[in-house]
Image (cartoon, coloured by chain):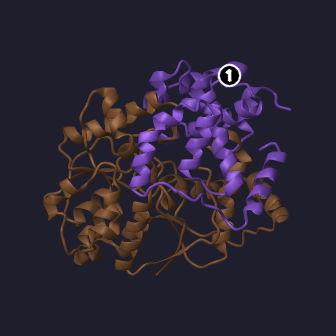
Chain colours: A purple, B brown
Amino acid sequence: MYKDFTDEIMSYPGGEKIMACMQCGTCTGSCPTSHAMQYTPRRLISLIRANQRETVLKSLDIWKCASCYTCTARCPRGIKFTDIMYILKTLAWKDQLMEENKDITAFYSAFQDLIAKRGRMNESELVLKYSLKTNPAKLLEFGPLGMKMVLKGRAAIIPPSIRNQKQVQKILELAKERGGE
Amino acid sequence: MIYQYYPGCSLHASARDYDESVQGVVKSLAMELKEVPDWNCCGATITPSLNQLQSQILPARNLALAAENRGDVVVPCNACYMSLKKIQYNMAKYKVVREKVTEIFGQAGLRLTGMPKVRHLLEVILEDVGLEKIKQMVKKPLKDLKVVNYSGCQLVRPLGFDNPEDPQALDNLMSALGAEVLPFSQKTHCCGGSLITTQPDLAFQMVDSILEESRAVGADMVVVTCPMCQLNLDAYQDQVNRKFNRTLQVPITYFTQLMGLALGLNKNQLGLQRGIISPFKALEKIG
């Protein structure tokens, strides 16, 4: 078991340097979505090191990371904060600690289910699944754009598939059985 | 030269125009692309948010399939490029990742027999063909066309081949094709692609600042290297306009589409008619 939350984060690839943070705030200053966060990247590191596991994993702020890697590229101490955001999201997902947000839960699980089902992504089916899981009225919102994409020949009418779908399913299941770690 | 092509999911659907222009351009450059057999989705930004090991194993399978054949893996999508490079980096750096991937592969009949080099298409064109040769091949210079080059995030960070803050590759290529490259402070600012469906308020603001600067500097179009950036900036432009009370109509063009035009390929071969914001009016400048 882990000594504390910092220890837990450090056990994952990309999380090991968190103790090097000197709270300079370059990450927060570089982040394109920190303006919308209560807990910004710098504050999240502080909260992790203060062992505030539940506060951090509950917060929807971690789902605002756009994976742009600007914080990672700029951190003067070599901390891979984008990777830490991924670690936090996977823990929140696994322990079902995140604050309820139907849009996020539905979209992420629809995407993941489609990979398991077909091996490849297609936006048409993704949007359909996502809308049905959240609010079917969303289909009306996506409708005009969807129509344009169809007319421009940019929507997959026949869902893509791969030959060895069983293999993709198997490796995903085995990874899940191992707790994703 | 022979390469292995990992198109990624978008290029078979929403980015068919990118795929069409890639096929046209590589033929002109005498590059041979062979699709990685039976490749799967790389997981993009979603799988790594849900399950660490699944996010390693998905791109790793693609590398295992590619390792069976000869040639570098060429990737046109920034997100796929980064996912594939990241699993390589993690397998090289972390013994635990190597061991787990190998163990799961063993049970699923997969084997990683080598580590193919993963490269973005832009990188391959610049390094293996080179600007000098490209300049000589230009039949129809993109004269008078004013562009801003938008590299986006994952082409250059964290494992990219160009400067992560001020990349030069796309600027150099567009200049070589005869276009006028305008200064653009947003060239590596994130477009919010991964947030557009679930948190549009956040993403729309990011799209808007990119489009608005392209207008302010007087660009005819934004040049991109990634299907996610293209979709975000092109297909959502109307909604972003409505939200911020603007009337922007900025075409978002793949670098391969412009390259194809400069190399003398027919407009219709390059998927240019598929832009939600049509580029044809802006392209009248080059005739």
**Of residues B244 and A181, which is closer to you in this image?**
B244
Quadrant of the rendered structure where residue A162 is? bottom right
Residue B130 placed where, x, y %? 33, 72
Residue A171 sits above or below residue A21 on the image: below
Residue B139 placed where, x, y %? 20, 75
Neighbour tally class for label 1: few under 14, some 14-19, many 20 plus, Cα within 10 Å:
some
Quadrant of the rendered structure where residue B20 is? bottom left
Residue B177 placed where, x, y %? 23, 66
Which amino acid is tagged 1? Lys
Give the quarter of the figure containing the C terminus of chain A. Answer: top right
Would residue A107 be found to the left or right of residue B215 on screen?
Answer: right
Residue A172 sits above or below residue A35 on the image: below
Residue A111 placed where, x, y %? 63, 45
| Residue B83 appears anywhere in the view | yes
Residue B11 sits above or below residue A89 on the image: below
Would residue B120 be found to the left or right of residue A79 on screen?
Answer: left
| Residue B29 appears anywhere in the view | no
- Chain bearing tag 1 is A
Residue bearing the label numbered 1: A58
The residue depicted at 77 percent of the width and 67 percent of the height is B110
Give the quarter of the figure containing the N terminus of chain A. Answer: top right
